[in-house]
Every structure is written in structure tokens, then in C-alpha cells.
């Protein structure tokens, strides 16, 4: 979904920022995969999830930037709450990865809020910092 949104953005700056959001999603997936494997959960994308993501992208692709930022910011609140509840119940061995999941939603919201506040030159800093932290949480090949 994020990749499709990035492709539809009108300016190189918007495309670059949305590609960074895509990278954050990819990194978060890599951080979570060992936890999912440990608990016997599948990590492959379900075709219905891919189809739903593509359909969702159509709702966002051509929104004006400020509307896109507001909509995403508002939608992230529910995810932050849900993932925080998962963190509270998670085994200690999973805390770092689940904390990363929560934090990835928090920095995504901070990005949207910074964009809406006109702090566009600073908006991606929290995302870049979190992506940099991921290397300490993912297994080395």
C-alpha cells in the first residue's frame, strides 16, 4: 500500500518521504519476523491482505498532502493503542521487537504531525532514527 501511495505523490519530496515510510514498514517486518517464527506464526503476506492494501491505497493515493497526513495521523492512534496492549501482554523475550512495532507507529504519527505543523525539514528525523535502531534488533546473515 505504501509503495503505491509513494508512486502517486506529485512531488519528489512527497515521494521520497513516502518511500521512507515504506522502508519503515519493511524494517518493522524484519524486526518482527523472528518473533512471529518463534510463535509459529506465518510471515508471508496473505493474498487477501495484499488486495485489501491495494484497495486502501486507492483511497489515499490522490489525496492532497495535508489530508493524507491528517488521515494517517488519526488512523495511527488506534494502532498505537492496540500494539501497546500487545506489548503489555507479550513475553519478555518479545518486548524489544514489540516495542519497535509500537515505536514505528509513534514515529509515523510524529511524521504526519510535523508535516501538518509545517516542520517539513524535521519531519523524517524520528523515522530515520528508528530505522537505524533496527539493525540492533534484526539477525545478521
Image (cartoon, grey):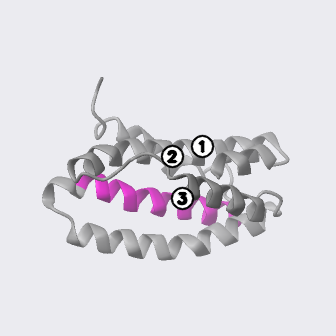
What is the number of the mark on residue 108? 3
Vertical comparison of 58 with 127: above or below: below
Q: Which residue, given by chain and number where applicable, does mark 1 sit on?
A: 20
The quadrant holding residue 33 is top left
Element class at badge 3 = helix
Residue 16 seen: yes
Q: Which residue is mark 2?
A: 24
Extreme residue in the left direction: 92
Residue at screen point 21% across, 65% down: 90
> Which residue is located at x 42 percent, y 48 percent?
28
Query: Gap in Å between the C-alphas at discs 1 and 3?
Result: 10 Å
In magenta, the rendered stretch is 96-117
| x, y percent for residue 118 | 71, 61
Front position in the image: 119 or 124: 124
The answer to whether the residues at label 2 and label 3 have Cβ atoms under 8 Å apart is yes
Q: Is residue 44 magenta?
A: no
**Sequence-wise, which precedes: disc 1 or disc 3?**
1
**What x and y, as percent, mark residue 122?**
60, 51
Q: Residues within 10 Å of mark 1 (few under 14, many from 20)?
A: some
Q: CA distance from mark 2 to mark 3?
A: 9 Å
Question: Is residue 60 shown left or right of residue 96?
Answer: right
Residue 85 rendering spot, x and y as whole percentages: 31, 75
Q: Main secondary structure of the magenta part?
A: helix
**Is residue 103 toward the left or the right of residue 62 in the image?**
left
Crowding near the residue tagged with mark 3, few <14, some 14–19, many ≥20 C-alpha atoms within 10 Å: many
Q: Position of residue 19 (x, y in %)?
A: 64, 42
Q: Is residue 89 left or right of residue 22?
A: left
Amino acid at each position: 500500500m505504501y509503495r503505491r501511495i509513494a508512486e502517486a505523490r506529485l512531488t519528489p519530496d512527497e515521494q521520497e518521504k513516502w518511500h521512507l515510510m515504506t522502508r519503515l514498514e519493511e524494517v518493522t517486518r524484519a524486526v518482527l519476523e523472528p518473533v512471529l517464527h518463534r510463535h509459529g506464526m506465518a510471515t508471508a503476506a496473505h493474498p487477501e491482505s495484499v488486495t485489501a492494501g491495494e484497495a486502501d491505497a486507492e483511497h489515499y493515493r490522490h489525496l492532497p498532502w495535508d489530508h493524507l497526513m491528517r488521515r494517517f495521523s488519526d488512523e495511527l492512534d488506534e494502532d498505537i493503542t492496540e500494539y501497546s496492549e500487545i506489548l503489555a501482554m507479550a513475553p519478555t523475550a518479545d518486548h524489544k521487537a514489540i516495542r519497535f512495532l509500537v515505536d514505528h507507529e509513534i514515529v509515523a504519527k510524529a511524521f504526519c504531525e510535523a508535516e501538518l505543523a509545517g516542520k517539513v525539514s524535521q519531519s523524517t528525523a524520528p523515522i530515520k532514527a528508528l530505522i537505524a535502531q533496527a539493525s540492533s534488533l534484526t539477525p545478521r546473515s
